[in-house]
Amino acid sequence: MKIKQYITALLVSLSLLSAASLAQAAEFAGPNGGRVIEQVEPHAEFFLTPERYAQITFLNAEGEAIAPEQQTVSLIGGDRSAPVKYSFERVGDVLRSVEPLADQPRMPIVLSIKPSPEAKTVREKFYLNQHLCGGCQLEEYACICGH
Ligand SMILES: [Zn+2]
């Protein structure tokens, strides 16, 4: 590839990335360095463990971990043509996916959190991009700097 084409491609992908994270960047990182979901009360952190389990930690107003109450969580991962549904179980004070997530770079995620049996389900959509962000040093799916 010619240098000029390469740079153009790089710039395009960089600006796409920042546009995607800008729209969704939370103000604070979660206690594990995961993505904080602010559209649900109490807020929740989505974190991918080193073994690729999805782990949901609920947070108090100070951003500290609290035990789940009636919340239930499910997740759909993968492309629209081959989505995989993951269910969650309580492990200690977090909800964790029963199975590890598939090893797919930038896997599209739809995370559903139902705060209580009567409450409306909250859906958070994002890409599970694990590249380290140069700005905040978090993985891109949890980026808080808008880069
Ligand atoms: Zn960042």
Image (cartoon, grey):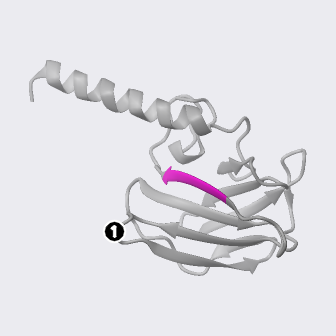
At numbered mark 1, what does the secondary structure look like: helix, strand or loop? loop
Q: Residue at x 55, y 76 (%)?
A: 86
Above or below — where is 5 with respect to 90? Answer: above
At 75% across and 56% down in the image, what residue appears? 44
In this view, 122 is above or below 133: below
Q: Position of residue 17 (x, y in %)?
A: 43, 35
Which residue does the image show at 85% across and 74% down from the upper left? 70
- Find residue 38 and report its horizontal and vertical position in percent: 75, 47
Is 125 a magenta residue? yes
Classify residue 144 by image quadrant.
top right
Q: Is residue 36 left or right of residue 133?
A: right
Compared to residue 74, the image places residue 33 above or below, namely above
The image quadrant that residue 91 belongs to is: bottom right
Q: Is residue 53 visible?
A: no
Residue 9 visible in the displayed image: yes
| Frontmost residue, 112 versus 59 | 112
